[in-house]
Image (tube, rainbow, N blue to C red):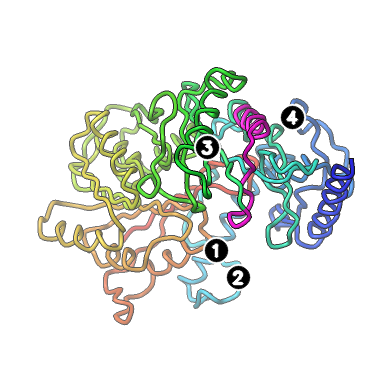
Amino acid sequence: MALAAAQTRSVLFIKRKYLHALRKTCLWFSTNDTILADQRKPPPKTHLRKSQKKTTLTDLSWEDMLAGVVTPLWRLSYDEQLELKLKRQERILSQLSGYLSGELQSQSSLPVRTKLSFPVLPVLPSPVRDGYRNKSTFSVNRGVDGNPKTVGFYVGTWKKGNIVCVNGDHLLNMPEKHTRVARCYQDFIRLSSLEPCLLFHTGGHWREVTVRTNAEGHTMAIVYFHPQTLTQEEVAVHKAELLDYFTRGPGSVCQLYSLFFQESAMTRCTHEQSPYQLLHGQPHIYEELLGFKFRISADAFFQVNQAAAEVLYSTVRQLCIPNPEEGGERTQFGGTLLDVCCGTGAIGIITSPRVDRIIGIELIEQAVEDARHNAALNNVLNCEFIPGKAEVALPGVMSQLSSAGGGPVAAVVNPARAGLHYRVVRALRNQPNIRRLVYVSCKPDGDAMRNFRELCCAPDPKKKLTGEAFSPTLAVPVDMFPHTPHCELVLLFER
């Protein structure tokens, strides 16, 4: 009883501390970024958006606060969400226009609102708005009741020391298959004799679980585990318990198509660093996009919204290699498409009927293996995928293309949030055969903006940017993440 009371006092203290921080630093989202995400109390998931009752911050439940963190726009109608996102993209891109016009001269300059020098189309909506995520990672930590074996998402921050783990069953973007696995995993670790690994240096073993699903309804679960000082024989006992729980025990309700187990002493590691061990089922799930089939490995990148990904890739394909008969028979235009940060090869494979050759470059070796498999699976014979860092591989590829004289070259880049390495930008900028470049970014106001400026600035011998400058000619936002302020931006550069 004393322990339970202490845990309750601790959680209440954390909640008060979190609410205090929320009053000072909460995220605001509107056309002027000034609508508090947690103004109204979310009703149950089945009655979302129907209640207009306003509450104060102290009235917010843990579920309210989590919804405000993970899906801060859920209270707005979908049209309002799209309007907000469009104005946000226009505000970001006005900085690029300001730089190009000379009104904004440096990356460190204060943001100014400049008239856009190129068109920004309305945000293309997601065909699916609720339960759209095909990949979710659930954390393990101390819950609202103080139980450290709680599976969900974080409210609070590590820096402020006010982390609480809250179940995500009510979140609009979560499919039932994902939350079911999370609930079962929580039940399993609460039955386990092993402690959860909340901080690596404090011990414990059970870590987060990742759930992946596809349109066919197949479910893949990946459980992450810190071995600490356990022997392989001891780890094997707990793997067997996990397998039994999800295949013959209460977790069998999840009907897992695949169950993976990865033991690692690192926060994140690749399959090469610590192999994903298949405990049950099939090693891959498959997804279809625009008539092409793609294999998805445990750690492969794939857009989290399959329906919106079709909108995104159709847009990218049309901007890279325009087809005046879009929607009719496939027409081949020739030349080469250079796909930088190609992942599992989706953009290149989807675009392959329109060009002579696809060259994809990707850092993760497993993704390259998947890309090659996907090309063979779809009987695509004009794709080549190169493993390695783009900044290392690209200069050689550019040299090869220049000497071969194989016709026009279009490029598409879809980097992580950190953007492109400056040597990649330099290689693209200095290749005169590239006349069209499509940049896909989920965070254009971050390091991607530096890339935009380097692609468009006047020639600068000091930076070895000697090629003709690109100009942005069209921006197309695509809503990949309903109920959040984020979207994918497709930006076309030409010269």
Task: Please tell me which residue lies in front, 263 or 156.
Answer: 263
User: Of the residues tagged 3 and 1, which is closer to the observer?
Assistant: 3
The residue under label 2 is which amino acid type?
Answer: Val
Task: Check disc 2: other Cα within 10 Å, few if <14, some if 14-19, many if 20+.
Answer: some
Are the residues tagged 2 and 4 within 8 Å (C-beta)? no
Task: Please tell me which residue lies in front, 475 or 257.
Answer: 257
Which quarter of the figure is the C terminus placed in? Answer: bottom left
Give the image location of residue 464, x and y in percent: 29, 76
Whether the magenta-drawn stretch holds residue 342 is answered as: no
The main secondary structure of the magenta stretch is helix
Give the image location of residue 253, x and y in percent: 59, 18
Instruction: Indicate the secondary structure of the residue bearing disc 1.
Output: helix
The residue under label 1 is which amino acid type?
Answer: Ser
Where is 326 relative to 460, above or below?
Answer: above
Give the mark nearer the N terminus: 2 vs 3: 2
Are the residues tagged 3 and 4 within 8 Å (C-beta)? no
The residue under label 3 is which amino acid type?
Answer: Val
How far apart are the alpha carbons under marks 3 and 1?
A: 43 Å
Instruction: Indicate the secondary structure of the residue bearing disc 4.
Output: helix
How far apart are the alpha carbons under marks 1 and 2?
A: 8 Å
**Is residue 35 at least partly visible in the picture?**
yes
Instruction: Indicate the secondary structure of the residue bearing disc 3.
Output: strand
The residue under label 4 is which amino acid type?
Answer: Lys
Rendered image: mark on residue 112: 2
Label 4 sits on residue? 45
Whether the magenta-drawn stretch holds residue 198 is answered as: yes
Where is 46 relative to 360, above or below?
Answer: above
Range of the magenta residues? Answer: 180-202
User: Of the residues tagged 2 and 4, which is closer to the observer?
Assistant: 4
Task: Please tell me which residue lies in front, 308 or 194.
Answer: 194
Left or right, 105 with respect to 129, comes to left
How far apart are the alpha carbons under marks 2 and 3?
A: 46 Å
